[in-house]
Image (cartoon, rainbow, N blue to C red):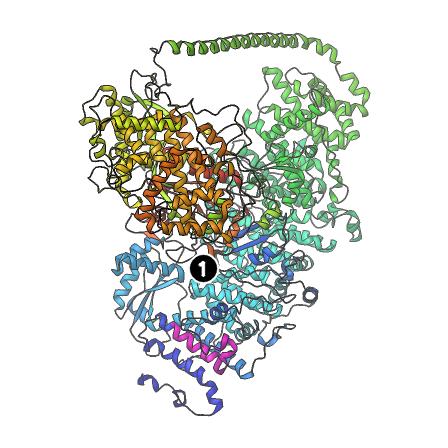
Amino acid sequence: MSGLSSFFPAKLLGSMHSNPRERQTEPLSRLRFTLETMPGSRKYNFTPATRAEILAELYDAFWGPYAHLFLPNSNSSLPLHATLSEVQASVGQLKEPQVVPGRPCGHIFKKGESCFRCKDCALDDSCVLCSRCFEATDHTDHNVSFFIAQQSGGCCDCGDVEAWRHTINCPYHPYSPETAEYISSFEAKTLLHTPRAHAKTLTSRDIPPVKNYPFRTHVPPELRESISRTIGYAVDFVLDTLDSSPDETFGPTPPTDVTLRLQPTADPLMLEQFALVIWNDDKHSFDEVIELLHDITNRSREEAAQIADRIDEQGREIIEMSSNSTRLLEMARAIAQIDLGVTVRRSFDTFREQVSAVIIEWLLDLTRSRLGTDALILREILASELLSPRKNSSLLSAKDPSRVLPDIHDPTRLDWLFLYHARLWKRPRLNLKEIYASLLTVSHEHKLAIASHFAGIYHRIIDAYLLTDREAETSIKYFALQLFTVPSVSLYIVRHHNIVSRLLAIITAFFTNQISDKRITFPPNPDAEIDVDTFPFKSKRFMPVFSDLRYLCHNEPVQELIAHNREFIAQFAQTCQIFMCINPNKRAASSHVEYETDAWISVFNVTLSLSRVIKIYGEAFSRATVGELVAAINTVMHHILKCIAVGDDRRELARFPPVAFHEVVYGETTYKIIDFDVMDGPISFHHSLQWLLAELFKHIDVLDEEPLRAAGYDSLKDVCMRHVSEEALLTVIDYPLRVLAMIAQIRTGLWVRNGFAIRGQLLHYRDFMLRELCYDQDLFILQTALVVLDPNTVFVSMLDRFQLLGYFSGATLHPSYDTSHLAGMVEEFFYVLITILTETASATKMSLPVAVRREIVHALAVGPCSFTDLVKRVAERMVDDVCFERVLKDVAHFKPPESTSDFGTYELRDEAYDEVNPFFYHYTRNKREEVEVVLRTRLKKKLGIQDPVIAPKKMNIIRGPFVTLSSSFESEVLVQIFFYGIYNILTLTDATGAAPPSAEAILDQILHLAMVAVSERPEVFSGLAVHKTYEEGKNLVDILCAFEYHDKYPTYRGRVQWTLDRIAEHQRDEVGTRRRSPDSGSKAEDPKEAKKRAAKARQEAIMRQMKAQQEKVAFNFEDIDDDDDEDQADTPEAPVSYGTCIVCQEELNSSKSFGSLGFIQPGRQLRKQPDGFQSYTNEAMTCTDSLDRPLLATRDTSFPPAPDEVKNSKRVQSTNFDAFPSQFTRFGLHASICSHMMHLDCFTVYSGSIRQRHRNQATRNHPESIPRKEYICPLCKSLGNVILPVVVSTPPPELNNLAFSDWVRAAGISILKSKPDPVVESLQFRTGSGEFVFWTAQDSAYQSHLRVADRPDSTELHKMVDTVMVVAKNISQQSRHLRERTEPEPGERGAGMYLPEELVGYTISAIEVALRGQGSPGKTVADMITDPQYRMIRGLLSCLTKLVSLSFKFRPDEGREAVRQAIIKRLLPEWSRTSFTTFSHPLLLRDPFAILVETAAVAPDMLKHIMVLTYYAYLARTVVGLVYILNKSRSSATPAPASRKYEDLFGDTRMFFMSVVRHSPIFEQAAEGVLSSFGEARIEQLLYAFTLPFLRRALILCRATYPNAFATPPDLDDSVCEYRRLIKILDIPPLAELPAQDTIQNALSGWCAHYGHSHAASQLNCGVMLEYPSIYRLARLPLVLDHLYLDQDKTMTCARCKTVPLDAAICLFCGTTVCFQSHCCMDRDNQYRGECNMHTRECCGPIGLYFLVKRCSLLYLYANNGAFGQSPYLDVHGEVDVSMRRGRRQYLHRARWEEVHKIWLNHGIPTLIARRLEGTVDSGGWETL
């Protein structure tokens, strides 16, 4: 330290003079001292504490003694590590918005925030709204898109006058007419003023403080002084640091030790301490960097991962510090080897750079803070400091403070910051951009000042961006978007900073590769040559430079400048000239092109970018006067001729071959035209100057006759011909004509030897979205030629270029085309001819909405299609225009998507078909033919004519130079072309007896043109058709008359007649003498027609006969079936068939054992009623009273939803999307079945084949897992793991129909009669409440079929039971922690899951749950279940029965009687009382439904009676559970029912309630409280809701066992509620009749007493969890997708990494948000699986279902496999928007959402994934899908 003190003047080192002037500099000098000495005193080690210290010093120096003006509630200082804006925000100081008319919003977007665009309101695409302003403004029916900010730094344009087409009335940012006036007067002034010779950039002195700001706070002068000095010093410190920072990272060979030491540095002591820094880029993955760091720095992978995260987040990170420079350079070499950015610099400089990053962060914080209520003052002071020149910050630096920028006069700090932007890294770069963005919104003057500095240094910014910047996406170049799109600003910088011509110079220099020392030469050498194989063309970065130019020129005021100032068009033409004819093609005639380059791709990218600018440049001239436009046309023509016609030595012959003329005789006239052979000469696709010329010719209103006369010109022809000769004009149009001829040849296959490159160019050139930039321009130039030159000459030039002069003079053989090529060329020629003669969009300057309408009508005429397909058929400029969707609504109907897989489609309205022209020039031949068919069928229907003629529409060109276009139809050349077109085809047809290739297409085209000709110029054309004679002395009419009744071409008759009739109006006699009368023709035709008719009649007779026979056969079949049923009743010997085995295709019957393919999966789907959640209690009270009827669709299901519904759809409030909490789920086994069956032997063979496949495809991720015993059904590809027995044995015993009390008595007597059965006693749990050990999954006594000798048929059954037991045991062993039951230890008898309850009971419950809310009148829940499901339930029950018989092998009844008695004893308390010790747990702790299942398995005949008992046990259980739940909730919050609705069902609820709990005083007290606070009506409602599911399940079970006994009676009253219906079918006495049922009362009191005395009741923990009674729902996703983003930091935060995930996944079961495939949350112990897999294990066991927010898709998971599913959201056009690429707002589609519910409730996720995996053979796991 003392070593440094000699540098400082004594007064700085802590001089404590009391002089007030001194005191003022004190905090600042302390700051200065701290920052200068910090690197050394901190040992170059930068820690969070260092950051906190720098911030503290900055704030102290900044506010001096005035901290209280900034800090809320008299905080004397800031908390450590906090920033001012955070503190102000935390106390809500920044919350209330300041409403000032005319001030823009300026909200700056953070990364991941949602922004909105409204095409109808915004001026261009760069204008966006934040979600708050968007929600506050009305955009009903507008074209709104929404997207997620990828980087921070954009800002909301609400309130900015220059951003919107009309005021959008945002309540927070009202409109102010003064602001609008100010801006328009500013624009007018700038346009008038002549620009200065040297641009003056605005500095802080030119900017007045903001006027009319009502929230001003008084700032003491010394505070303002200390603020500005501190900010100034801080900025200078940053700049001084960056002075010595490098522009680029190391190349592949890092510098040597010596050069390393010579690096520029700010370290006065030149210490030998170095730091190695890795820089972020967009080329390397996380894993690559982690591996590299792990290898070269010996860090652990976890540490390496943290560093990689920091590199990604900050933009760079110090990896190693050391004085051993050699070692660091070695490491740097290893890093640079893989092209990762790396630098080694002195630690001193690196440390100072980190300090600079903190300073930038602090400056950003100031822009977000307020001084009192004043939100502007800090930004104003910051702006004025940035706009002042640098001072020298360092006391140590001896450099001259007024450092100069060579090409900038008096640079300010802002210029330096712009220049050094590329030296910074990601985080500070983004922070700086955010600072600049916040300064733009202070005032218009600030915006201008910043723009003028940006423009001043723009060329240096572009240099860095194009040539050196390592991280392009954070480049300051993109800041141009926020400046160049503001009309007044762009006008100012174009006027005063000449930015357009500088941009053009940059483009010129860059593409001619004038680059030296990482700089683009300025000004460029105009004569430099272009080479498409150099670096600039391969660079991907040039596109944004063109878009900058486009943004600038697109602004209204700049368009004015372009139109009125000649130098703009001159410079632009100069730039376009460089790109003229680049990359020419030459036909490979004899051999293939060996090496196909792809240079054409980059060339197209460049010229298409250029052509978009050409479009805008050309459009500017609609504002020009005649004189200006004519001058522009001449300038462009001059440039074209200069480069293609002027011969000099430097000229590239490949691009511009010399111009030669030759004379051609055609139809007795000689024409002098250009001589060029397309098959031989070089031709380029790119004629930028001709495209520009075409744009200029489109202003037909300016080029109309009157304005031209006023300017001294006769016509457009005069304009063109005044300065150039006819030959010159022919040269100008010849280039586009060559391209058209070349395209025709490529399309007919004459250029195949040029390989793929030529096809690619053609496709791009004619692509729907791009063609109007190039191809259509070429056609338009040719169309203009028809008006400017003699049409005959143009036609002959075309024939010559297409090499068809001979063909249209009668020679049907061609020297270089073979027949198919020749026909193809003729067809292409006519296509061009039709376009230039009849396409009128450009010729009439069609307005955009009309043009868009025409495109849409023609795109949809082919048939309805989705929005995306439609967009692909229309040019991009039209789709991007605001009118597109409005016009679409006018001409088409939207058909919203209904089912789960269809999309919304648009269908053309009927009246719009009248506008369709089948020869529309964007149609291909196939499309044209399709459209003709559509139109003809429509006309047939409408007019009732057999062969309607589609008459062409009139061209109707009423003004402008193209009025004379239709006079081209008077051309003699054209008539000759028509004549030979038809004549050649007819002669060839007559000669060969068949139509030549393409004949139909060519005839269609010729007739269309002839029809246009007779409707446009009837007189002259008719005259020529009659008087011009050709071959054999015939004229056109002769040929038409011969063609009219030609037997090979009957389809053309209508059109030919139509044409001849029109000609006859003018030349009646001539036509009359030549036409054949149709009579003579029709007789000849007749025999053919008669034959046809006879054939048809014969065919119909045969069809009738066949139909009669079929009906007869079907009738017989029905008889056979009926006989069968009767036979079976008498003779049971005939084996019953169950279909065929899906493997061997043989019949399945009792002769050979078979089973159903089933799947048992663990699940946590059944839900328990959550206690302590008020909302769930309320839900149970308002539950619907019939779960077997569909819920009334209260919601409007139209799509897209109505605007009101969108408005009212609430924002996501809760953090879990109202999902069901996963801790209240119940674990169990769910069985499902795919309805296919196979023989047991076949199953064994099939399983073997699966194992074989796994061995063969070792690396594949198979859909099934062998350790889990899975297989895939060979037919339907469902997943399975068991084979269930199909019950084929005798029907079950008769149902016992005794009255209930009699049955109880009989049962009692039979128990008394029988001896006690110790075996059964021993097989019941001691600890449980009467479960049997042989029914548990891990029962140690269970033996597989291999160990048990048995009868063969029961062995087969045993085999199937084995498959079930293996799977159940497997799952049971892994899931003990998920079960609440107390159970024996593993290895003892009775360990594991209890199958009647947790397999059969669970499965039936799940089936019942899935059917809630579905059904139709007249059906109960049991009628909704499919036969296979019933078959499965019976199969499961027979497995249970088999398990009993295995335990009682040696009893004749296989133990059924013993178990039956045990069940009765368990249920009737007088028997269980005798052995209280037997069952330690009361019956009410068991699920009574399980007992019902046991009964169905062992003694189905007593189902009815056991049902009554279990129902009452269930009621009692419900009471216990209700007391427990309601005790925790308040009644005040629950809805009050009007009165009791179910008194006939439940009778005296209060009495029942109290009698259940009376045995336990604690419980009784709780129940009293609950009853008094909730009242009987509510309690009854809850009893109803919670016991209804039991009845539904019981009915399903009974129906499965006795399909007929429990059938739905036909006379069932449908109007009553489901409960009453079920009680009636099941024959259960309702609770209201309890007083009359002594036996039930006895049973109840016994159960309740046992429960009341047990310890469960004493602690009120009850042990009874009720089931959730309503319809199951997944998490509630918002109606509109973007609502997810509104409060995402509240609703979507990942609990693991505590951040808002960039790529969030929402678990649809429990509503938790997790990170999707992210680097932060990963299961490193389990194959690096992501957080979705981790969460799935905690949440729902083996299955997971997630909505991936950013990707807009669903993710299904099952046991480490998964699949993606389609999103339930669709956009306005009814389409899925994957990854939000299109960015339209998306709405939840109900049908798709229901489908997801269905898959989940029916346990379909594993099968869905298996099918997806089965369909893809991949080598690397499902993640590669």
- Taking depth in this image into account, of 278 and 264 the one nearest to the observer is 278
- In the displayed structure image, the side of residue 556 where residue 1694 appears, left or right: left
- Taking depth in this image into account, of 1598 and 669 the one nearest to the observer is 1598
Residue 553 visible in the picture: yes
Determine the residue positioned at 77% across, 25% down.
Answer: 1062
Q: Report the residue marked by disc 1.
A: 467
Check the picture and name the quadrant holding the N terminus. bottom left
Determine the residue positioned at 41% across, 48% down.
Answer: 1523
- In the displayed structure image, the side of residue 1014 where residue 1117 appears, left or right: left
Question: Considering only vertical position in the picture, is 125 above or below 813?
Answer: below
Residue 67 within the magenta-colored segment of the rendering:
yes
Residue type, label 1:
Leu
Q: Helix, strand, or loop for circle 1?
A: helix
Residue 221 image-quadrant placement: bottom right
What predominant SS class does the magenta segment belong to? helix
- The spot of residue 642 in percent (x, y) is 61, 51
- The spot of residue 1164 in percent (x, y) is 36, 42
- In the displayed structure image, the side of residue 1747 where residue 773 appears, left or right: right
- The spot of residue 1625 in percent (x, y) is 46, 28
Residue 55 within the magenta-colored segment of the rendering:
yes
- Taking depth in this image into account, of 105 and 964 the one nearest to the observer is 105
Magenta region:
51-78
Residue 917 image-quadrant placement: top right
Extreme-bottom residue of the structure? 18
Question: Considering only vertical position in the picture, is 1340 above or below 90?
Answer: above
- In the displayed structure image, the side of residue 554 where residue 468 appears, left or right: left
Question: Considering only vertical position in the picture, is 567 above or below 738?
Answer: below
